[in-house]
Image (cartoon, helix red, strand yellow):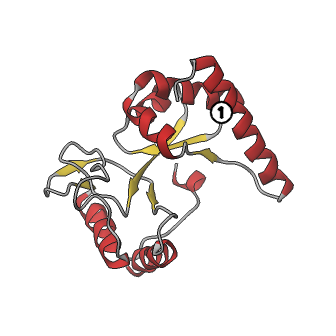
Amino acid sequence: MQLPAAELEAMLIYQIGALAGIARAEGGRLTHVKPHGALNNMACEDAALADSVVAAIRSFDPGLILLAPALSKLLLAGAAAGLQVAAEVFADRSYTDTGKLVPRSQPGAVLHSADACVEQVLRMLEAGGIVSLGGELIHTEFHSICVHGDGPQAVATATAIRTALLGAGIRLVRLPEVL
């Protein structure tokens, strides 16, 4: 879907506002925004779209953290606009030698077992960045680890990663505490 920048920003402000209201009604507080799915993927590659996402977040609340994939145009746009940004990596997706996600249509793009995901996360932590499917290291800081929740192994994978991180002596904290 192609939308004019102003329309996309208005839609995002509306959605962020609704989510903030739901959080407040449940006794919580919205601390960060992570675009989802196709919008996230497109904003990672398209600087103009990334700027629109960032503009919506800044317009709603410039104190919100932008959670965006490491090395993406979305992450760069957030930092350039003065937002706090947190970089995320994917536990259950493979990376190309340039640090982008391997397209799902290619073999090895998705890691299906909890063990493979734990191995990938620990490898990235040890290496200090993204390790590609081809074995290349792209040094980058990251603050969050994403596990896609739409697979049958999602809960088991997240639990296994949490257990492995705690076992390795890594302290897990809320996103605002990381930055």
In the rendered view, would you say 114 is above or below 75?
below
In the depicted view, which residue is nearer to us: 105 or 156? 105
Specify the farthest residue to the right: 25
From this view, report whether residue 7 is shown above or below residue 141: above
**Residue 140 placement, left or right of 12:** left
Q: Residue 78: where, in percent of width, then height?
A: 49, 31
Q: Percent x, y for residue 77? A: 45, 28
The picture quadrant where one finds residue 173 is: bottom right
Q: Position of residue 22 (x, y in %)?
A: 80, 51
| Image x and y of residue 56, in percent | 63, 28
Q: Is residue 13 left or right of residue 66?
A: right
Which residue is depicted at the point 77% across and 53% down? 23
Mark 1: few, some, or many residues within 10 Å (few <14, many ≥20)?
Answer: many
Establish if 176 lies above or below 123: above
Which of the 4 quarters of the picture holds residue 112? bottom left
Element class at badge 1:
helix
Residue drawn at x 55%, y 33% is: 83
Q: Which residue is mark 1?
A: 12
Q: Nearer the viewer, residue 52 or 103?
A: 103
Which residue: 52% across, 30% down? 1
Q: Amino acid at mark 1?
A: Leu
Decide if residue 24 is on the left or right side of residue 124.
right
